[in-house]
Amino acid sequence: MITGTPKPIEEILEMLEPYDNIIVAGCFGCVTVCRVGGDKEVQVLSSTLRLAREAAGRKIEIKEVCLERQCDPEYLEPMRPYIEDYQAVLSIACGAGIQFMAEKFTKSPLLPGINTGFLGVTERQGEWTERCQGCGDCVLHLTGGICPVTRCAKSIFHGPCGGSVQGTCEVDKEVKCGWQLIIDRLVTLDQMDNYGKLKPYKGWDSSRDGGPRRIIREDMV
Amino acid sequence: MLPCTGRIDESLLLKAFENGADGVMVIGCLEGDCHYVNGNIRARARVERVYNILEQINIGPERIRMYNLSAGEGAKFAAFTSEFVTRVEELGPSPINLARSNGPKESEQEVQAT
């Protein structure tokens, strides 16, 4: 899922300084699962903002909504009839959702209520870790299901670097060496021959190097 | 009155302050003695989160507190309630109520759950 963290309330209040009536918009997608931008968080954030603003002597009117997804146009459309009745939208969806809403409703200022994180997994309640950087050229079948792009701090492709010490990475002793994990897994799977099958170099043209990416599935268009 | 503090969430607690409460007292069953296994443990975490929110927005975190009691501890309930009400009276009206009335209010509202 796409993860995120709430922005500090002070930062949000500063963003809202010019506005007296806004929409707080959540998303039932990833941000609901990682408990940063769902219906419940819309309610809590809205109450918090109303209390903070009223205590400061300047009330704010808030419409609370939570869309099925903010990254699909059909779920944004229901906002069209009323969105311009409000001065701004504070979205607590991921950066993709916020931007998509901004594109669809060009007259409404869009404000981010969260800091979008990474593509990750839930380790336990309240803890998420990164697994994928969306490089566009997956090699997990050769690396024991462990991603060298994400799990190696340098995203290198040909084994542990000199900074790997007893299974940990030089960037942080809490971070495991991605390549040590890969080799350990390949040994367990008896697939060390895969180690030699990795491509001589990785093409990064499917990653971010070419700017914002686009996927067109001709079979679905 | 709620059947279990496990039903309480942060928005409900904040709503109490929006509705004019100067303090909110949450009373759950004794820890380890929840009929629904861990409702009161969940409530404690939620109360802590609201405590932090109230601190961040300068409402005063001490305006919310959770107590744990069994249903048979009437005297203790009365003592806890008196203690909390006295504390809230010392704090005075919440900044919300001050902004609304520009003066102290006599009444204070409390949400209770056992």
Image: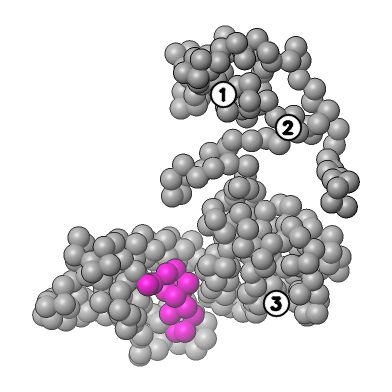
The residue located at (52%, 86%) in the rendering is: B100
Left or right: where A180 falls relative to A11? left
Q: Is residue A21 visible?
A: yes
Q: Is residue A179 above or below residue B28?
A: above
Q: Is residue B41 above or below residue A157?
A: below
Write down the residue under mark 2: A135
Query: Mark 1: few, some, or many residues within 10 Å (few <14, many ≥20)?
Result: many
* Foreground residue among A215 and B24: A215
Write down the residue under mark 1: A144
Question: Label 2 is found on which chain of the structure?
Answer: A
Reply yes or no: does residue A76 show up in magenta.
no
Badge 3 element:
strand
Q: Earlier in the sequence, mark 3 or mark 1?
A: 3
Residue B70 place in picture, x, y as percent = 16, 73
**What span is in magenta?**
B7-20
The residue located at (25%, 77%) in the rendering is: B114
Reply yes or no: does residue B11 show up in magenta.
yes
* Foreground residue among B20 and B9: B9
Q: CA distance from mark 3 to mark 2?
A: 40 Å
